[in-house]
Image (tube, helix red, strand yellow):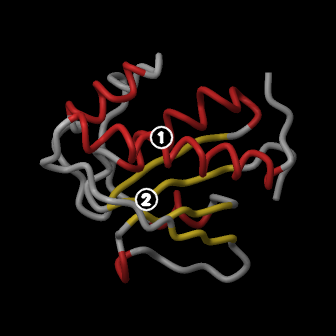
Amino acid sequence: MSTRPTVLFVCVHNAGRSQMAAGWLRHLAGDTVEVRSAGSEPADRINPVAVEAMREAGIDITASTPRKLDWDTAESSDVLITMGCGDVCPVFPGKRYLDWSLDDPAGQGIEAVRPIRDEIKRRVEQLITELGVTTA
């Protein structure tokens, strides 16, 4: 892993969980980590309820857009964190993989998405500790 690790969050639509995780990591780690997110079947836009849940936490993820997971992005990432993409996520020898089993916020209201957001924050904080990066 380089001095500035690269973390890729992957879920199916790249519209909820992976976008919230990327938002938390950017917010908490700043530029000490390169943050990426992608989806196996990206949606047209970010889930508006995920946007609202993150806004409540003071994080704006509206500038992000769902992206298609591609081989080069995955291969050049140090840590790949999957969230429900199953067998469509590529596997590269020597990479660190984590699979975060989280409820999918798709089609859920804000009351259901808040606990998902909070659990993602907890896991991102743990990841930052494990990566050993210094945050602001």
Residue tagged by mark 1?
Answer: 118
Position of 23 compared to 56: left or right?
A: right
Q: Residue furthest left?
A: 107
Q: Residue furthest top?
A: 58
- Residue at (59%, 66%) from the top-left corner? 75
Residue tagged by mark 2?
Answer: 10
Position of 130 compared to 22: left or right?
A: right
**x then y, percent, for residue 87:** 37, 83
- Residue at (32%, 50%) from the top-left corner? 14
Give me the disc on residue 17. none
User: Is residue 26 positioned above or below 94 on the image?
Assistant: above
User: Is residue 22 positioned above or below 88 on the image?
Assistant: above
Element on which disc 1 rests: helix
Q: Earlier in the sequence, mark 2 or mark 1?
A: 2
Q: Residues within 10 Å of mark 2 (few under 14, many from 20)?
A: many
Residue type indicated by callout 1: Asp
Q: Nearer the viewer, mark 2 or mark 1?
A: 1
